[in-house]
Structures are given as C-alpha cells and as structure tokens.
Amino acid sequence: MRSYAGDVDFPYARLRRRPDVEADNLQAHDATDALLVARALTLDVRGEDIAVIGDEYGAITLPLTASGRKGVRVHQDLATGRRALALNAADLDLDGFVPHELDADLLAGVRLVLLQLPKSLAELEEVADAVARWAAPDVVLVAGGRVKHMTLAQNEVLARSFGSVQAERAERKSRLVVASAPREVPADPPFPVSQRHGDLALVAHRGAFAGARLDIGTRVLLDVLDEGAPDAGTVVDLGCGTGALAVSYAAAHPEARVIATDRSAAAVASARATVAANGVAARVSVTHDDAGSELPDASADLVLLNPPFHLGTSVHAGAATRLFEAAARLLRPGGELFTVFNSSLAYRAELTRLVGTTEQLRRTPKFTVTRSVRR
C-alpha cells in the first residue's frame, strides 16, 4: 500500500469523479475536504474511532487512510460516490477504510465524525440525531461546507442534537462548524417519516428528495399515467426517490413487475419502506444502483423518469443526460419512456436523439411530460 505524508502531500488532483459525470468545471475535491482532513490530523484519534459522512469521491477518507489512520468508517449516500471511492483507492493503491450505511455500526464508539454538510436541512437533522444517538459520549462532530452554501439554520439544526455548536472562521471560502456535548435523544429514532396522499402512503428518510411529500413534477407525471399508461410486463422507475411512481404503477397494474432503482441510499431505504407500506412488496423490487447499471440491456417495456437537474450544489445537464442514456439502454425496441422535467430545460430534442421519437403529452407553466418510443 502506498503511503503519503498527510494533507499537504496528498495528490488531491488525481482524484476522479467517475462513474459520476466528469467535466472541466466539476472537481472531485474542494477546500472543505482539505480543511476536514487537516483538522482530523491534528487530533489524537485512531482511525477506527473516526467516521466520515458525505465524502463524495474519497477526498476525506483517502487522505486519512494515506496518513496511517486505519479502519476509518465511511458512509456515502450515493452509489456513484461509493464506486468513485473504490476506484480512486485502487488508483492510489490505498485501503483500510470500512464502508457502512448510516446506522449504529457506522457510529458505535466513534469519537470524531467528519461531515461534508448536506444540501438539505432535513438530511442534516437525521445525521445529527444519528451521531448523538450512537456515537461515543465525548464525540466531536466537525462539519464543513463552502461558505456560500452555509446558513445559520444549519447551526440551529445541529444545536437540537448537541449542547455546543461553534462556527469557525472561514478559510479558502470554506468553513468548519464544531458540535460537541451530544444531547439526550428520544428512545426511538424520529426517522423515517410517513404521509398519506389519497391511496398512496409515502415513507421517507430525511435524505430523500421531497421527503414524504409528493413533489409537483411526480404529481404531474402521475396524472398523465392515470389517464393512459401503457400496460407493460417489466417497468423500471429510474431514479425512484421515495417510490411514488413505482408503487402507483404497481397498484394500478397488478400484472406488472416493477423495478425501482436510485443511486441514493436514503431514497432506496425510503422506497423500500413505501413499497412495504402500500402492500406491493411481492411485485416491486428496489435496488441501490447508478443509473440502473446492474439491470440488463433491452429488459424493460416501460421506464418512468423524473430526472434531477442538479449535481450536488451545481446545476448541470449531465445529471439528466446520464439517465436518458440509461433509459435508452434499458428499453427494448418499441419500449416507452415517460419523462417529466422543468419546462425551461427543453429536453425534448435530447430525448429524441438519445431514445427515439418524442412527443409532448402535458405542459404546465412549470413542468412538461413527454413520451419517447425506443427506436
């Protein structure tokens, strides 16, 4: 195994984002990663007593491993991040970290948690509760982010789970917030949450997009499907979120086999709970995967898609393009893709190019629904 001399000598520039979208304006590390690593290296904490949460591509975990901190526990929500970490570790000949889900095994006995602040306050709330609930009584949570994305509300969320929350001075346009003295937590975790929408019960962990709400785009697509969704033997809900599309289609089409897949572990856990809550577990399977990469080519009769248009905190068309390409691969010739997207994004030409003939089925002031037939 290769050894590096800590933060200064670690080759951050060699880290890559693949299999996530790569572009000249998208990096696999930022100054926040380096600040978190530098703070950890000043502390007398063994690797097995450190947990890293939200490390997108390995820019926190791998420098710690390279410095000799063995047994670092790491939780990444995204399947793309998990694969990127493994690929970057192989490229740099590094090992010694241990992947986990966001659970007691990740945090039991941990004395230092390093966190890249999530975009969502709800997700931060779930992470903070988990650390206060399962980590060592003297645990210190060091959270970092880019200053332009940080708010006082994040401090307030942390203060619900920790008695001390201190924001530090900004460095290189990033800032660390240190939380300590975990508060007593309720006996049962407050997550996931559930909400009923007519006949549909949605269950959500805090990291899942829209939580237990039925987001507007999904609602518009469901309205179109209710009016005339084709009967299909195998259906894929690509980027399933909390599972609203998969469960709704399964409920309306009892003969269909539905596969719901998402790259977010929080979304997958939510979708599995939603499937169970709606009594369709025998006909809907849920997988944690990157753009359906583990599903066979030409295996689907119908793909349902409400694509994202963000990569982390950046707006980037590549997020949707990868899913359009995945849908084209998964659909059999003549199979259909139903997509909903923000009308301003004008994806119709790209869907025609990547999938096949595309027609507009519904347009509201904010959303457009299209049907594409695989050529």
Image (cartoon, grey):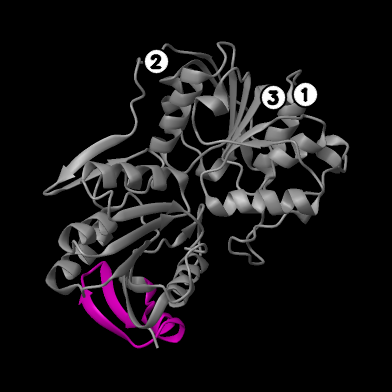
Q: Is residue 233 magenta?
A: no
Residue tagged by mark 2?
Answer: 185
Residue 320 in view in this figure: yes
Quadrant containing the C terminus in the rendered view? bottom left
- Image: magenta residue range: 345-373
Image-quadrant location for residue 120: top left
Amino acid bearing label 2: Val
Whether residue 5 sits left or right of residue 217 in the image: it is: right
Tell me if mark 3 has few (under 14), some (14-19) or many (20+) residues whose alpha carbon lies within 10 angstroms of its own: some
Whole-percent x, y for residue 152 in the image = 45, 31
Residue tagged by mark 1?
Answer: 42
Residue that appears at 67% across and 47% down: 30
Labels 3, 2: front one? 3
Whole-percent x, y for residue 160 in the image = 40, 20
Labels 3, 1: front one? 3
Whether residue 312 sits left or right of residue 246 in the image: it is: right
Of 157 and 212, nearer the camera is 212
Residue that appears at 69% across and 38% down: 61
Disc number at residue 316? none
